[in-house]
């Protein structure tokens, strides 16, 4: 993988919030730990690839609606485009392109590159 040295790379992971019922039985600290652990696991492969390429990057983790959060963050970070995988890992199954990728492509005002 070759990344232009002047390029800012932002790697984002968005965890969906837990349901109201589940959140009633867990402390805020437990939920934060849960989301942090799952984000770190999800970001591991991207970090390994980017570290191997010697790329400069920043990771960001959020909790919320994945598509909306990705699009909002791309706007706030003034990103030129969004690159994301199509492999659906969310709660929606059966689509060739994951529902998050479809939603990001529909909501984004910048080009979206979907990688299979």
Image: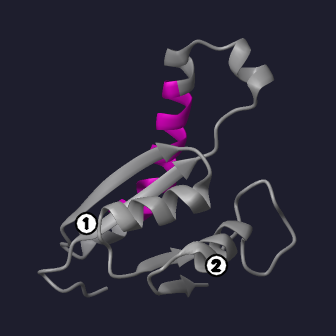
Farthest residue in the left direction? 6
Report the residue marked by disc 1.
51
As measured in the structure, the alpha-carbon distance from the residue carrying label 1 to the one carrying label 2 is 31 Å
Residue 20 or 13: which is nearer the viewer?
Answer: 20
Q: Quadrant of residue 95?
A: bottom right
Question: Quick check: 109 above or below 71?
Answer: below
Residue 96 as seen in the image, left or right of residue 69: right
From the top left corner, tell me how far across and down residue 17 is, in percent: 64, 37
Closer to viewer: mark 1 or mark 2: 2
Report the residue marked by disc 2.
106
Element at label 2: helix
**Residue at (79% x, 81% y) in the render:** 96
**Residue at (50% x, 26% y) in the render:** 32
Element at label 1: helix
Residue 71 or 34: which is nearer the viewer?
Answer: 71
From the top left corner, tell me how far across and down residue 98 is, in percent: 72, 72
Q: Residues within 10 Å of mark 1 (few under 14, many from 20)?
A: few
Q: How is the image coloured?
A: one colour
């Amino acid at each position: 993988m070759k990344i232009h040295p002047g390029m800012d790379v932002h790697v984002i992971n968005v965890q969906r919030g837990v349901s109201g019922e589940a959140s009633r039985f867990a402390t805020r600290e437990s939920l934060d730990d849960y989301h942090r652990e799952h984000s770190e696991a999800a970001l591991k492969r991207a970090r390994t690839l980017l570290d191997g390429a010697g790329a400069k990057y920043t990771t960001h983790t959020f909790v919320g609606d994945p598509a909306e959060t990705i699009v909002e963050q791309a706007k706030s970070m003034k990103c030129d485009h969004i690159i994301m995988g199509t492999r659906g890992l969310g709660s929606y199954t059966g689509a060739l392109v994951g529902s998050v990728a479809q939603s990001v492509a529909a909501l984004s005002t910048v080009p979206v590159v979907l990688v299979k």
